[in-house]
Each structure stands twice: as structure tokens, then as C-alpha cells.
């Protein structure tokens, strides 16, 4: 139930930034003939992403779609989820191995190949563990039961006399491997929607921490990510772009590029690119193109953005949540003993996946195959089909395990660019975005302005809470605190930069502001920040993580005198997080000395994998908390290089203590995202112990 | 890097930024950790270049690779070859580095997934293993 909401309010996203000028003319003709003028190229994918649940096809009940038991006894699972570093290739295999009673080593997964795996909406929203693991587990359990039936029939024995373990079924004197039982007779059938799967207490492989199933390929450099994929006769592509993130072509002279041997220049309206027989020649040809771009005037900058967002608010709130209101906020404010109001600014930040967005495209007999790092293989297939006007079954998208994404790889523009270049060149083409393209042509976590207003009664209880978020997104905009009178609104606005999903979506911005304000009110009332939260918390899971982290941190006393502690808690995507930070004064501000985290996401599937995800999420959160912010103006990104845009590095990471609360009685929730949300408010509130803190991100002393 | 990846097909060294600022393309040039993306072909000369592909010998992993596997010092793995090469180089000059030494030397290698604490553990694990054993065959210059 909760999960459905997650997908529905899934983050802001803009239509892909590509246009087919030449083809659009035919397009318009076709649609004019049909009596419509729909621009399918941009509407299709945007609608697909926006519709979330409604665009979903049903979960296949066909066993063979999910599980294959080979005659060699090897088990293959099929899933549309993509491996982007969250280690689901291992944890999903654990679910299959557990239910089928086979060693983990005999399970492999085919992932994210649209020709081979059942439809999947995409890998986002921390849903792989709560949603995909049970699907595969049910299929595996069904396969096991079918194998037991076969053995019982074969040996004419009662099923209850059979045991199933280590990939074999045995009855007293007889025993057969799974491979023998499927010889000449593939396992097919229907997976009942309620096929019983093992409860947490009966897990054997799940709940343990095996090593990453194909870890060796990664430490030896043998794994082929998309930029490492090669095809026979493959050429190297480059897209010609303006210096900034926008612009239309004013003039274009490709004579220099055409002079480079073997180079094909592609031009269609504002899309231009080169294809060359080698990567170096592609670079040389791209550099030889003389293109002038018209940049629109008067675009907002990173300093004017916040006014711009307020000014361009659009009625209705757009996508996202409807305003939520309870009680009588105005009356409560009027009766409040004290009120506390503040405005916070949240900048755009970038995902900076270490593997740049890239794709290899190959056309064979009108069929298109694309290898690309994306979180939405079926979504990208549909974008490609729409863009090139071919049926979806003529498009195959294959996603090699990808060098991270963090919500940044949902759209298919780089796949489309590669396919466009490949079509023009008549050869397979690889396209790897440069780091500059990454910063300018990807999309960002949305910037936002947030107004928060609180009213407390004479007893120090919150009685009024108003929260208005412009643009940064509605995820986790609600408050978990028990406040009788509330008005919470999300306002859509015009974003000058492309924006979309990011790890934790807007939950980081909304948690930052909510928790910083809770801290500010507690400080003003001279009430302990943990005690003040507890006063308003009924949810025992939230109380548990907050209590655990406070205890572990030694709250309220910092471990070294002169330092300061801060704390924050929250919930998102069905899991609970509390974070404490200890900071000290430094010459140019402050230093984070220690982070303490308590996290609870139901039953733990892979404890070491979970620890890795929590730690990684917290460290990524350090970037947004301490230094990440996209600077832009005049249509260009000003800090779009690895040197200028600082992401967390070794020296930035303080000791991190992680407490994982295992709730064996609760279903497993996703875990890759939520731990990011409380890092910034824990640090921000700690820094308040050193001095006044600006109402913005990154955290800084005012 | 272009030569390694595209001419020689040694794709273990990754393209991350092209600025020498992320370390995904780290190789050893005469045992020194070097960003292959900013290394000019003309500057290579007689320098001996070791890439991630040259570390394991006959399927026997280098102790640093073993340590990364054991500590699960990765998530997406894209930074891993560069991290492993940087570690090999670090341990050659400093066989028992402190946390600070590791952070200092490896600060220009980025792990965007944030597995830094695990990488530090892997480096120390490798250091202790390499001290207690005779040099592995792969330690012999190739």
C-alpha cells in the first residue's frame, strides 16, 4: 500500500531534451493526416514516467518468465531490475537460492535485457528488495514444488517422504538432481499470486552476507560496463554542443571535420554530431567543427533561482501531492504562545555517476539493439521506439551492470543520440558522454525554496505546522510528528535546469528543513532536541531509531568537550533513520568528527550488503550537506568539472558508526536511499552548537 | 588511456572525468600511480605500464585484489580498478600506511558510491597480508 504511493509521487521529471527536425516534418504530416498534432517524441516518455503505476504492465505469472532450471542443474533468474551497485544481483539470487534450496553459486541472474526478461518499470524507489525479491522467491518456491511433484510421480512415493536440499530431491534410497528432473521436460506453469514463501525465521541463504556473486570480475577489471562494450565495425560518436546547457545552432561549418579521414558528420536541426573510426579521430573531428550557438538571454542563475522559483509557481501544484490540511492552522497560529518561521534554500546538485552516461547502438535489418547504463531499460526501449518510429519489439535494450546512477539514469537521451549517430553512419556507434556533458546535459536534483512555520502552545507542544515547498519535490513533505493543525503544500515552478530523480528524491530537502526547524524550535524553547521530538512522536519505529542513535552517540554530551552534537530522524520508503553528528570548530568553519546512524528497514536480507548501502548513502549525503551545489548563469554550468564540483573524497569521511536494527517480524523495505536524508540536518543542527547556521544547503556558519 | 582502452582493448582502466581528478583510470607507470587519462603517449617512452589486467598472474589474484574482494570494498565497482592500482602503488612506498596516509595518498581517487571506509579496510588488510608473506609472483616486475 505504502509502496504504491512511492511510485505515484515519483519525482519530477522533464521530457527528454531531443528533437528530430527532419523526421518531425514527416511526423507532423502523419499526425495532420490523422487529425492530430501530437509531438509523440516528447510526450510518450514523459507520460510513461509520469503515469507511474498506471503505465505498469501486470506482473507475469508465467514461471518460465522468471526462473529456468537447466539440465545441468543450474538455475537462472530473470529480472528487469538493473545492477547499479546496490548488489541486487547477489541479494535477488539469495532469494532464489533460498526458496529453491540450491547453493547460491548455482544461481545466476539475467538482468535488464528487454528481449529476455519480463517487463519492469525500472530500478528506483528502493523497490527491488520489497517488490522484486518476493516475485522471484514465489517463482522459485513454485519451481521447487513442481520438482517435488515430479519426483513423487516418478518414484511413486508420497511427497511427504521427499526432502529437497542442495539442488537435489531425495527419498530414502533414491535421489535426483534438479537437472535430471527437468531433462527433456522444461519447467513451465503458473506462479500462484499467493505462492507461499519462507518466513524470515526459515531463511537460510537470505539473512546471511555472501560476497558479491561476481566480485572477481570487478577487481580484475574484466567486467564490461557500457563504455567498455565493443561491436564488430564499431565507430566512435561525439555530439556537438554549445558551451552551456542550452542553445540553438546559429551557424555550422563542418568542413574541418569532414576533412578528417573516415568521419561522418550528422546534422539534423540543432542536433549535430560526428562519427569516426577511432575515439581520437572522433575527438579531433568534433573539435574541428565550427558551430555558433544562440543562447537565450535573461536566464536565471544560481543566485536568482530562488526568486525565480517563487515567481513562476504554477497553480494546482502540478504533479506530486495535493495540498494536505488538517485541523485549523490559522486558528492554531492565532492561539499559539510562540511562533517560529523560516525560509530555506536548496540548490541543484548533480549525481556525478563515475560511469558517464553512455550507449552503444547497432542497427541490423531495421532492428535496433542498444547497450546502455539505465535504470529504466523498458522505458528507454519505449523512448527509442517512439523516437525512431519502430515497434517496441524491434528494439532491444541491454543494460550491462552499471557504474552507478543514484536516480540520474532514468531517461534515454544518450541512447537515442547513439542510435541516431549509428543510423546515419550505418555502423554500430559507441557514445560516452564527457564529464562536461554529464554536468550540462544530464539532469539535477531539483533546487527549491521552502517556507516553514511552526506554532507552539504554552506547554511547549507544537500545535501548528505549515510547510510550503517550491519545486524541490513532494517526497517526505509530510511530518511524522503529531501536530494537530497542519497545512503542507508543494508548488510546481519553472526550473531553468533539467531536473529529475536523485537518491532519496526530495526527501533530503524536506527532511533537512523539517528537522532543522524542529531543532530551532527546541533550542528556542530550551528543550532537549531528542526530548522535544519524542514529545511529538507516536510511531514506535521512529522512536526506536531515535533512541538507539541518541544512546550510541552519548547524547547530549559530545565525546570531546568543545565539540557539538546534532541529531535528526526521519522515515521514507518504508524505512526509518536517525542520524547524529559531532562537529568541531575549524579555521574555515567546522569539521565533521563523527557520524552515528541507526537504521531500520524491516527484516535484513544481506547484513553486510545493507551496511555497505547505508554507509554509502550517508557518505553521498555528506556531499550535499557540506559542499555540493551547481553554480550556473548565462545558460552555462559554471562548476561542471570534477575539479570544480567537489564530491566526497577519502579525507572528507569521518568515522561512521552504524546500528542496523533487524525487525524480523516486518517485511524488508528498500534501503539504498533513506539513510541519505538525515545527514545534512544532523550536521546542520550540530553546527548550531558552534554558531549561527545559514538557512540553506550546503551547511555553513552564517 | 585512449591507447589502452581503444587500441589495446584493455578496458579495465575506466574513463571517469578526463581531467585526472577521479582516479578511475589509474595505472602504474614504472610503479608510480599515474592518471592514464592525462598521460600523453609521447611521455610514455620506455616507461613500463601496468594496468589492472596485468595484476593477477595465471588466475592468482594480487593480494590487493583479494583484500578488496574480502572487504567488499566496492558497490558499482567502476572505481575499483583505479583504487586497486592506487593501493598497489601506495603499499610499495608505504607498506604499513595509517588511515591518514591512505586518505592523503588516495584522496584523488573518487568512489561515488561512498565505500571509502571499506577501501581503507581493504588497504590495511592487504598491507598486513603482504607484510606477512613473501612477495607474490605478481609483485615481480613484469
Image (cartoon, coloured by chain):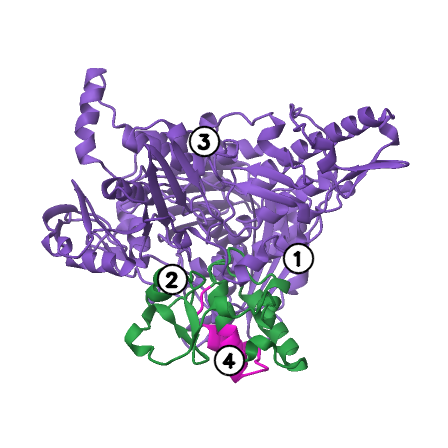
Q: Nearer the viewer, residue B119 or A547?
A: B119
The quarter of the picture where the N terminus of chain A appears is top right
A654 relative to A81, above or below = below
- Label 4 in the same subunit as label 1: no
| Label 3, label 4: how far apart the Cα atoms are | 55 Å
Q: Residue furthest bottom?
A: B93
Q: Residue furthest right?
A: A172
A69 relative to B106, above or below = above
Per the image, label 4 sits on a secondary structure element best described as loop
Residue at which label 3 appears: A52
Magenta segment, prevailing SS (helix, strand or loop): helix
Residue A661 x/y as whole percent? 69, 51
In this picture, residue A248 sits left or right of residue A659? left
Residue at which label 2 appears: B5
Residue A65 x/y as whole percent? 57, 30
In this picture, residue A406 sits left or right of residue A482? left
- Which chain wears green? B
Alpha-carbon neighbours of circle 2 within 10 Å: few (<14), some, or many (≥20)? some
Find the magenta span and give its range.
B86-110
Return the disc, 2 or 4, that comes first in the chain's sequence: 2
| Label 4, label 1: how far apart the Cα atoms are | 44 Å
Residue A565 x/y as whole percent? 56, 65
Mark 1 chain: A
Q: Which mark is residue B141?
A: 4
In this picture, residue B9 sits left or right of residue A336? left
Q: Are marks 1 and 2 in contact (CB under 8 Å)?
A: no
Residue at which label 1 appears: A659
- Which chain wears purple? A
Per the image, label 1 sits on a secondary structure element best described as strand
Mark 3 chain: A
Q: Quadrant of residue A364?
A: top left
Amino acid at each position: 500500500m505504502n509502496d504504491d504511493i512511492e511510485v505515484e509521487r515519483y519525482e519530477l521529471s522533464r521530457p527528454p531534451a531531443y528533437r528530430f527536425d527532419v523526421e518531425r516534418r514527416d511526423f507532423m504530416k502523419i499526425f495532420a493526416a490523422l487529425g492530430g498534432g501530437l509531438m509523440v517524441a516528447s510526450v510518450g516518455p514523459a507520460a510513461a514516467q509520469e503515469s507511474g503505476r498506471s503505465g505498469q504492465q501486470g506482473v507475469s505469472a508465467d514461471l518460465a518468465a522468471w526462473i529456468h532450471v537447466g539440465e545441468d542443474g543450474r538455475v537462472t533468474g530473470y529480472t528487469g531490475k538493473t545492477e547499479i551497485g546496490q548488489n541486487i544481483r547477489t541479494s535477488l539470487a539469495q532469494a532464489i537460492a533460498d526458496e529453491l534450496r540450491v547453493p547460491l553459486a548455482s544461481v545466476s541472474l539475467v538482468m535488464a535485457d528487454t528481449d529476455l526478461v519480463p517487463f519492469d518499470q525500472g530500478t528506483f524507489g528502493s523497490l527491488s528488495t520489497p517488490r522484486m525479491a518476493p516475485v522471484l522467491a514465489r517463482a522459485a518456491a513454485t519451481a521447487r514444488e513442481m520438482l517435488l511433484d515430479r519426483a513423487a510421480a516418478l518414484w511413486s512415493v508420497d511427497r511427504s517422504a521427499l526432502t529437497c536440499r542442495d539442488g537435489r530431491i531425495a527419498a530414502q534410497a533414491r535421489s535426483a538432481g534438479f537437472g535430471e528432473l527437468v531433462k527433456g521436460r522444461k519447467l513451465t506453469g503458473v506462479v500462484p499470486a499467493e505462492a507461499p514463501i519462507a518466513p524470515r525465521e526459515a531463511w537460510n541463504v537470505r539473512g546471511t552476507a555472501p560476497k558479491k556473486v561476481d566480485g572477481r570480475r570487478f577487481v580484475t577489471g574484466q567486467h564490461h560496463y557500457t563504455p567498455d562494450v565493443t561491436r564488430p565495425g564499431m565507430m566512435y560518436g561525439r555530439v556537438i554542443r554549445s558551451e552551456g546547457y542550452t542553445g540553438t545552432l546559429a551557424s555550422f561549418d563542418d568542413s574541418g571535420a569532414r576533412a578528417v579521414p573516415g568521419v561522418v558528420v550528422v546534422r539534423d536541426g540543432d542536433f549535430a554530431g560526428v562519427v569516426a573510426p577511432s575515439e581520437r579521430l572522433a575527438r579531433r573531428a568534433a573539435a574541428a567543427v565550427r558551430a555558433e550557438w544562440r543562447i537565450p538571454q535573461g536566464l536565471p542563475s544560481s543566485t536568482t533561482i530562488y526568486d525565480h522559483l517563487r515567481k513562476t509557481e504554477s497553480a494546482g501544484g502540478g504533479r506530486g501531492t495535493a495540498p494536505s490540511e488538517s485541523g485549523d492552522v490559522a486558528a492554531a497560529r492565532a492561539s499559539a504562545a510562540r511562533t517560529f518561521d523560516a525560509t530555506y534554500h536548496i540548490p541543484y546538485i548533480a549525481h556525478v555517476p563515475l560511469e558517464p552516461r553512455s550507449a552503444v547502438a547497432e542497427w541490423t535489418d531495421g532492428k535496433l539493439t542498444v547497450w546502455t547504463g539505465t535504470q529504466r531499460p523498458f522505458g528507454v526501449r519505449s523512448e527509442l521506439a517512439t523516437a525512431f518510429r519502430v515497434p517496441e519489439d524491434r528494439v532491444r535494450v541491454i543494460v550491462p551492470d552499471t557504474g552507478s546512477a543514484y536516480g540520474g539514469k532514468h531517461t534515454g537521451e544518450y541512447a537515442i543520440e547513439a542510435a541516431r549517430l549509428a543510423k546515419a553512419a550505418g555502423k554500430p556507434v559507441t557514445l560516452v558522454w564527457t564529464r562536461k556533458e554529464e554536468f550540462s546535459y544530464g539532469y539535477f536534483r531539483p533546487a527549491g525554496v521552502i517556507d516553514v512555520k511552526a506554532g507552539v502552545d504554552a506547554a511547549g507542544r507544537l500545535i501548528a505546522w505549515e510547510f510550503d515547498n517550491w519545486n524541490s519535490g513532494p517526497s517526505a513533505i509530510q511530518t511524522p510528528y503529531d501536530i494537530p493543525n497542519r497545512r503542507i503544500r508543494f508548488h510546481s515552478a519553472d526550473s531553468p535546469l533539467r531536473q529529475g530523480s536523485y537518491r532519496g528524491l526530495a526527501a533530503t530537502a524536506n527532511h533537512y528543513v523539517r528537522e532543522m526547524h524542529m531543532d530551532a524550535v527546541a533550542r528556542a524553547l530550551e528543550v532537549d532536541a531528542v526530548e522535544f521530538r519524542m514529545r511529538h512522536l507516536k510511531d514506535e519505529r521512529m522512536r526506536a531509531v531515535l533512541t538507539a542513535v541518541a544512546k550510541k552517540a552519548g547524547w547530549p554530551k559530545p565525546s570531546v568537550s568543545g565539540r557539538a552534537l546534532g541529531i535528526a530522524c526521519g522515515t521514507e520508503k518504508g524505512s526509518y533513520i536517525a542520524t547524529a553528528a559531532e562537529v568541531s570548530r575549524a579555521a574555515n568553519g567546522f569539521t565533521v568528527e563523527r557520524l552515528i546512524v541507526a537504521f531500520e528497514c524491516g527484516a535484513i536480507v544481506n547484513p553486510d550488503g545493507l551496511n555497505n548501502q547505508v554507509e554509502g548513502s550517508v557518505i553521498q549525503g555528506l556531499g550535499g550537506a557540506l559542499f555540493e551545489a551547481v553554480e550556473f548563469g548565462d545558460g552555462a554550468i559554471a562548476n561542471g568539472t570534477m575539479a570544480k564540483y567537489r564530491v566526497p573524497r577519502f579525507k572528507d569521511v569521518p568515522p561512521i558508526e552504524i546500528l542496523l536494527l533487524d525487525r524480523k517480524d516486518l517485511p524488508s523495505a528498500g534501503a539504498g536511499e533513506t539513510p541519505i536524508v538525515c545527514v545534512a540536518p544532523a550536521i546542520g543542527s550540530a553546527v548550531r552548537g558552534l554558531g549561527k547556521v545559514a538557512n540553506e544547503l550546503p551547511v555553513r556558519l552564517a | 588511456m585512449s591507447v589502452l582502452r581503444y587500441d589495446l582493448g584493455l578496458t579495465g582502466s575506466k574513463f571517469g572525468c578526463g581531467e585526472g581528478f577521479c582516479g578511475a583510470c589509474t595505472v602504474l607507470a614504472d610503479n608510480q600511480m599515474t592518471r592514464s587519462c592525462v598521460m600523453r603517449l609521447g611521455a610514455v617512452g620506455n616507461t613500463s605500464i601496468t594496468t589492472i589486467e596485468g595484476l593477477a598472474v595465471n588466475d592468482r589474484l594480487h593480494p590487493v585484489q583479494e583484500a578488496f574482494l574480502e572487504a567488499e570494498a566496492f558497490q558499482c565497482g567502476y572505481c575499483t580498478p583505479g583504487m586497486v592500482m592506487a593501493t598497489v602503488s601506495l603499499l610499495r612506498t608505504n607498506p604499513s600506511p595509517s588511515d591518514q596516509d591512505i586518505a592523503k595518498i588516495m584522496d584523488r581517487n573518487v568512489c561515488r558510491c561512498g565505500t571509502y571506509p571499506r577501501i581503507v579496510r581493504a588497504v590495511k588488510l592487504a598491507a598486513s597480508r603482504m607484510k606477512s608473506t613473501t612477495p607474490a609472483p605478481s609483485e615481480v616486475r613484469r
